[in-house]
Amino acid sequence: MSQERARRSKRNGRSASVSGTTSKKRVIAAVNDEEPRWLTSMEQRAWRAHLAAHKLLEHRLDRDLQTFGLSVNDYEILVNLSESPGHRMRMSDLADATIQSRSRLSHQISRMEAAGLVARETCVDDRRGTFAVLTEHGWATIQQVAPHHVASVRQHFIDLLTDDQLRELEAAYNPVVNHLKSLR
Amino acid sequence: MSQERARRSKRNGRSASVSGTTSKKRVIAAVNDEEPRWLTSMEQRAWRAHLAAHKLLEHRLDRDLQTFGLSVNDYEILVNLSESPGHRMRMSDLADATIQSRSRLSHQISRMEAAGLVARETCVDDRRGTFAVLTEHGWATIQQVAPHHVASVRQHFIDLLTDDQLRELEAAYNPVVNHLKSLR
DNA sequence: TCGGAATAGTTGAATCTTCACCTATGTTGA
DNA sequence: TCAACATAGGTGAAGATTCAACTATTCCGA
């Protein structure tokens, strides 16, 4: 996803090879002490199925949303705002809810602002803060697009699974989500 | 993921509002005929768990790989090449295997070539073709990094699930993957 | 109450991805 | 056999994401 660190290293005159930071050495030691526990073929199939399904799904949903000039990221923002009181959220809360960096959200909101979907409002309680607020156009857009998006999600995902499978999937992922959120 | 279509529309002087292509009208008709089948709260929880888990996982794995100057995309390429006879694959096959566009792969391979991880070789059988080939450095890199990456995948995903859950997950996703691949 | 630390958010530059277009080679059928 | 078409891959520009650095405000302890 990002090769910036490597390039940065190069720019700084450090090679991308194994050596350098203390934390890296610690990580390496932790693994070098023992024989790697490679994935069994079953584990590998599950892991690769997850990766493939996600990539293909996101690509397909993006395609379907393109019809309306939206990306899945745009859609996610619109949904979050539309479900919030006053159709507004603090930037940080929105960044957390959509699992992305504040910087990325800031750029994204700027683009959506330019497209007339949202507006920024400064927060009176905490003058450092900013609200992202749904505009009329944003609200109209999400209402119009939502049925189509749900249809896509059903067609390409939900309706291909049984209720039991969906429940199992949720039960399986929740610990993963909690684990990873605790690391942030 | 991509707002390009929307912007392009704007550039072309067409609005991003609902109207325009024939295919769009068809899609809209298909949905407008009936009341949208909204997701049940169970379905929604499953869908959102999938999305959250994937985002968090990819972010974490990227972080862990950054230690070695690689992205998950780089890693995936290296794995595919290292598992192929002669440590080489045709560009198109590699693009299919990693589920990305040829253009994106081409840029990616150029960057990895610059980093000394892979090389391009022209194909003698089909002179339109190109092989991406693992270099010594690429091979050394994947061998060195793989144990750490597997440890990450285990720590943040595999080891948090039971064998049954993994099997169910694979069984659930395979139809989705097949469905979506058939659409491409 | 003052000054340092923490928090909220933005910005610019570098990198990565997407799209449309382009070249070169191979395939096919009239 | 040769013209039309299809396939393999690359390229440049525009858009999206990341990282580090920055401003402005708030918090908090001495």
Image (spheres, coloured by chain):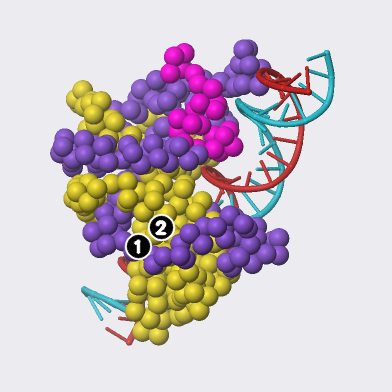
Chain colours: A yellow, B purple, C red, D cyan
Secondary structure beneath dot 2 equals helix
In the image shown, does A30 or B3 lie closer to the viewer? B3
Image position of A115 with respect to A71: above or below = below
* Chain under disc 1: B
* Chain under disc 2: A
- Magenta includes B85? yes
Q: Residues within 10 Å of mark 1 (few under 14, many from 20)?
A: few
Residue C21, picture quadrant:
top right
Residue A20, picture quadrant:
top left
What residue would you read off at disc 2? A151
Residue A116: % across, % down = 56, 73
Magenta stretch, overall SS:
helix
Label 2 vs label 1: CA separation?
A: 7 Å
Mark 2 and mark 1 in contact? Answer it, CB < 8 Å: yes
Residue B79: % across, % down = 40, 26
Image position of B69 with respect to A109: above or below = above
Q: Amino acid at mark 2?
A: Ala
Q: Amino acid at mark 1?
A: Arg
> Where does the magenta region start and end?
B84-107
Image position of A173 with respect to A72: above or below = above
Placement of the N terminus of chain A among the 4 image quadrants: top left
Secondary structure beneath dot 1 equals loop
- On screen, residue A165 versus residue B126, left or right, reads left
Residue A105, picture quadrant:
bottom left
Residue B72: % across, % down = 41, 38
Residue A179: % across, % down = 21, 50
- Magenta includes A109? no
Residue at image point 54% right, 28% down = B92
- Is any part of residue B127 visible from this angle? yes
What residue would you read off at disc 1? B37
